[in-house]
Image (cartoon, rainbow, N blue to C red):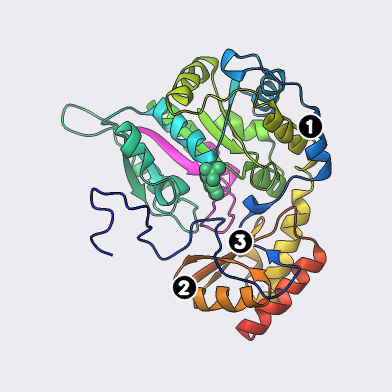
Amino acid sequence: MAEAGKGTFSGESAVSDRPEGTFSGESAVSGVVDLRSDTVTRPTAGMRAAMAEAEVGDDVYLEDPTVNALEAEVAALFGHEAALFVPTGTMGNQICLRLLAGPGEEILADADAHIVTYEHGAAAALFGIQTRTVVSRRGLFDTGELLAQVREGDWHTMGTSAVAVENTHNRGGGTVQPMAELTRLSTELRDRGVALHIDGARIWNAAVASGTTLSAYGQLADTMSVCLSKGLGAPIGSVIIASAERIAAARILRKRLGGGMRQVGVLAAAGRYALAHHIGRLADDHTRARGLAERLGVPAEDVQTNIVRLDSVDAAGLAKAAAEQGILISQVAPDRVRLLTHLDVDDADAQRAGDVLAGLLDR
Ligand SMILES: Cc1ncc(COP(=O)(O)O)c(C=O)c1O
């Protein structure tokens, strides 16, 4: 295994934890409750109807009215000039990073961030961007410590071009970046001419949990990438938010990456439907996550949104035993699993998952 991946690509993963959203186990039970990720949701009937009825055009020619409407809507929600629809959160993050840093330049991110853990070194591989990592606690920074790592460049020293923050934090367990800290970070970075990117794959959960408006988050960031395909329940799609000038550059980067899409209004329609119908209901996912946490003895303060992290467990053994009883969970480290509540998990599902897992954990 040690040799795998050295300059070759075999298509095999060298890590033990499964990528999100994959499952090769068999369940003997019907009525599976899938808590591996909030990406597993399927479009609702209302969403499918909106997709079927979508007006479409060729988006590479800027002629898809539904995409144009989605982009205008998301830009306005976050108080920015412009937005761009992209297929995935990964492409959204990477385009944003390239907008803020170039080859041989540096970004700072926390060591457990999605861009560091789950994007296969894209910033380095695609754009020659160096990522320097800092340690966080469950994805949350000590702002003073983070700022202390921001370097001014000169002929000798690598300067920091941008800082990337994830909100909510996936591997941190759905933690919400405190607004006061984010504000301080944003202000001090602006004073130093360093950009801020927010990976807002689950920014909706952060906003609902903290009562912060989306535009308040938007105002702090130079670029954001937000996902429609996580808690909001759309099948595909993320949106980049930035200044008009940066979005014009992002459109070219998206094309270069093969992300220029044609009659993609069918997907943008799902995103628009999700924005209209699925933000407020995230509070229910958070309540169910707290209920699960309580049942499993996870401290309430560790569950801020829709992710429950179970530490110090035999992750593989627990995931296998749970799957045998129809409860799917993700292993994210050898001793850690996570459960996510989402649109396709109702109260009865959460109750059953809690009962099965509590039984297996003897809690
Ligand atoms: C925090 C975070 N950022 C980015 C992404 C990437 O999204 P995608 O899977 O659409 O590439 C994810 C996916 O789960 C995520 O959790």
Secondary structure beneath label 1? helix
Q: CA distance from mark 3 to mark 1?
A: 28 Å
Q: Is residue 197 left or right of residue 70?
A: left
Query: Of the residues tagged 3 and 1, which is closer to the observer?
Result: 1
Is 206 left or right of 140, judged from the image as shown?
right
| SS at badge 3 | loop
Dot placed on the residue nearer the N-terminal end, 2 or 3: 3
- Splitting the image into 4 quarters, where does residue 286 fall? bottom right
On the question of residue 312 being in view, the answer is no
- Quadrant for the N terminus, please: bottom left
Q: Which mark is residue 335?
A: 2
Under 8 Å from ligand 1: the CB of mark 2? no
Secondary structure beneath label 2: loop
| Quadrant housing the C terminus | bottom right
Vertical comparison of 147 with 300: above or below: above
Rendering coords of residue 149 (x, y %)? 33, 43
Q: Which residue is mark 1?
A: 52
Measured along the vertical axis of the image, is residue 97 above or below residue 204? above
Instruction: Confirm whether residue 199 shows in the render.
Output: yes
Where does ligand 1 appear, by image quarter?
A: top right
Disc on the earlier residue, 3 or 1: 3
Q: Residues within 10 Å of mark 1 (few under 14, many from 20)?
A: some
Q: Residue at x 68, y 21 (%)?
A: 72
On residue 246, which mark appears? Answer: none
Q: Is residue 163 magenta?
A: yes
Residue for badge 3:
36
Q: Please state the horizontal and vertical placement of residue 253, each as a whole percent of the image.
A: 44, 23
Please name the amino acid that badge 2 sits on.
Asp
Q: Residue at the spot x=65%, y=72% of the render?
A: 27
Badge 3 density bin: few <14, some 14–19, many ≥20, Cα 10 Å: many
